[in-house]
Amino acid sequence: MKSDTQLRDEFEPTRVWYDCERTEPVSEAVVAAVNEHIRRDAELPPLTEHVDTDALDALFGCDTPGAPRVSGASLEFDYADLVVTVESVGRIEVRDAGR
């Protein structure tokens, strides 16, 4: 996972790139992006309470046999007090809700 910015304003979204051909599932990349955005260890609810992680990994991962292939697609969902957007081009954006 690669971050677009090393130093960001606390209210700016965090954008990271994931490589769908790596062994890391997209859902794990989402959790890492969220941790980077909040910049601290926080007690967050399980991601599975907010999105179907198996479906997320199947839609946006390249190595899932029989998975639908999406292009030009994105999925946005709320997670804790954040909004997460996953794009099929390999980008994850995390921003504070209401911004």
Image (cartoon, rainbow, N blue to C red):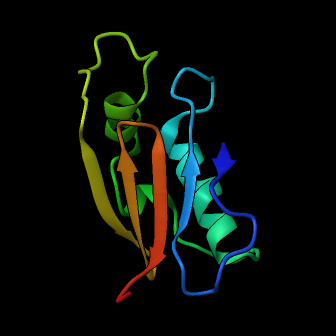
Residue 62 horizontal/vertical position (percent):
43, 20
Q: Residue at x 35, y 28 (%)?
A: 58
On-image quarter of the C terminus = bottom left
55 lies above or below 64: below
Q: Residue at x 55, y 20 (%)?
A: 21
Q: Residue at x 63, y 86 (%)?
A: 10
Nearest to the observer: residue 47 or residue 96: 96
Residue positioned 29% across, 60% down in the render: 76
Left or right: residue 10 versus residue 94 is: right
The quadrant in which residue 5 appears is: bottom right
Give the quarter of the image for residue 25.
top right
The image position of residue 30, as x and y in percent, is: 53, 52
Q: Quadrant of residue 85?
A: bottom left
Q: Is residue 18 left or right of residue 58?
A: right
- Quadrant where the image shows the N terminus: top right
Q: Position of residue 56 (x, y in %)?
A: 36, 40
Residue 84: where, in percent of width, then height? Answer: 41, 63
> How many marks on residues?
0
